[in-house]
């Protein structure tokens, strides 16, 4: 049974995962980052409230899916004795992010016209 205090009840889990993948891709386009830092950024911005309680697992799964699809690339780096996987965007990811941005621009124009 859905909780009434959930602000994302209208979205299915698949929809939230898609939004998460888009947000991750756009964030990685801005600069390389490792998963833990990405999750902490989401917590700071309260994006995790939108995605829900599975933000940590969904972030790791989304990173893996984006990497397998060729949109991002992970590189292992050792810092202070700890190995971290930093993600950067690929050429394919840049093309996808540009397409996504154009698509959402059109959606926002349509919504603005529709809602008046």
Image: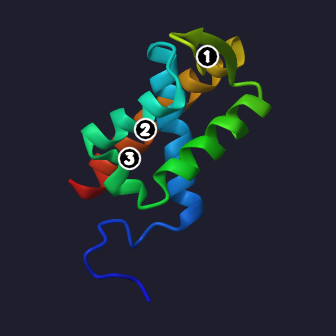
Query: Which disc, if any, is residue 33?
Result: none
Position above or below: 31 against 100:
above
Q: Are marks 1 and 2 in contact (CB under 8 Å)?
A: no
Return the disc, 2 or 3, that comes first in the chain's sequence: 2
Estimate the spatial distance between the alpha carbons at disc 2 and disc 3, rounded to whole Å.
32 Å
Q: Nearer the viewer, residue 77 or 82?
A: 82
Foreground mark, 2 or 3, reads 2
Residue 111 screen position, x and y as percent: 34, 50
| Residue shown at 52% from the left, 24% from the top | 34
> Circle 3 sits in a helix, a strand or a loop, which is it?
helix
Residue 26 screen position, x and y as percent: 48, 26
| Residue shown at 36% from the left, 36% from the top | 40
Residue that mark 2 sits on: 39
On the question of residue 86 being in view, the answer is: yes
Residue 108 screen position, x and y as percent: 36, 42
Query: Which disc, if any, is residue 110?
Result: 3
Estimate the spatial distance between the alpha carbons at disc 1 and disc 2, rounded to whole Å.
17 Å
Return the disc, 1 or 3, that comes first in the chain's sequence: 1
Return the disc, 1 or 2, that comes first in the chain's sequence: 2
Residue that mark 1 sits on: 89
Name of the residue lying farthest toward the bottom: 1
Q: Seen in the image, is 69 located left or right of residue 106?
A: right
Q: Nearer the viewer, residue 8 or 78?
A: 78
């Amino acid at each position: 049974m859905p909780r009434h205090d959930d602000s994302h009840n209208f979205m299915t889990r698949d929809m939230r995962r898609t939004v998460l993948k888009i947000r991750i891709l756009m964030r990685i386009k801005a600069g390389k980052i490792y998963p833990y830092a990405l999750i902490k950024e989401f917590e700071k911005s309260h994006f995790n409230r939108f995605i829900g309680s599975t933000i940590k697992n969904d972030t790791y799964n989304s990173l893996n899916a984006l990497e397998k699809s060729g949109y991002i690339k992970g590189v292992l780096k050792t810092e202070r004795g700890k190995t971290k996987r930093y993600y950067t965007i690929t050429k394919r990811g840049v093309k996808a992010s540009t397409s996504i941005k154009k698509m959402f621009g059109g959606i926002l124009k349509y919504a603005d016209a529709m809602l008046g």
